[in-house]
Image (cartoon, grey):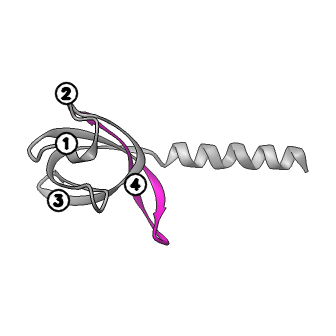
């Protein structure tokens, strides 16, 4: 039983890591009240939920509310569940180089 639990934990951790991705784009809007950020990528605007524990390091901005539209960012994402819906969740926001 113990070996099975450990193996399952390893598989679940691997699945979480393998579903992570990066999105590079320009910030169009930020909604701290809804915990969302909208970015333009390749001419298309996409809105993503930002995790409460997301690591934010965009210039001097360390909180979602401080990120300004027009800023170029890199979002690190993972698969998540928000209000019972599977969707892409942002776990980190960094300045784009």
Q: Residues within 10 Å of mark 4 (few under 14, many from 20)?
A: many
Residue count near mark 3 (Cα–Cα under 10 Å), binned few <14, some 14–19, many ≥20 = some
Q: Position of residue 18 (x, y in %)?
A: 52, 44
Q: Residue at x 26, y 46 (%)?
A: 64
Which x, y percent locates residue 20? 45, 45
Task: Judge whether 83 appears above or below 15 on screen.
Answer: below
Q: CA distance from mark 3 to mark 2?
A: 20 Å
33 magenta-colored: no
90 shown above or below 82? above
Do the CB atoms of the residues marked 3 and 4 lie less than 8 Å apart? Answer: no
- In what element is the residue under mark 1? helix
Report which residue position mark 2 lands on.
97
Residue tagged 3: 45
Q: Residue at x 46, y 70 (%)?
A: 83
**CA–CA distance in space, label 2 to label 1:** 19 Å
Which of discs 4 and 2 lies nearer the camera? The answer is 4
* Disc 2 element: loop
Is 10 on the left or on the right of 65, as rendered? right
Q: Are marks 1 and 4 in contact (CB under 8 Å)?
A: no
Q: Secondary structure at mark 4?
A: strand
Which residue in the rendered view is the most extreme toward the right?
1
Q: Residue furthest bottom?
A: 84
Q: CA distance from mark 1 to mark 3?
A: 20 Å
Q: Earlier in the sequence, mark 3 or mark 2?
A: 3
Residue range highlighted in magenta: 78-97
Q: Distance of mark 3 from mark 4, alpha carbons?
A: 16 Å
CA–CA distance in space, label 4 to label 2: 22 Å
């Amino acid at each position: 039983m113990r070996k099975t639990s450990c193996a399952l934990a390893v598989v679940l951790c691997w699945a979480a890591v393998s579903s992570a991705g990066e999105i590079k784009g320009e910030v169009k809007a930020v909604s701290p009240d809804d915990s969302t950020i909208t970015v333009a990528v390749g001419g298309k605007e996409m809105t993503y939920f930002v995790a409460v524990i997301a690591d934010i390091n965009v210039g001097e901005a360390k909180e979602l509310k401080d990120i300004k539209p027009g800023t170029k960012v890199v979002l690190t994402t993972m698969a998540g569940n928000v209000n019972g819906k599977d969707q892409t969740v942002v776990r980190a926001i960094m300045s784009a180089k």
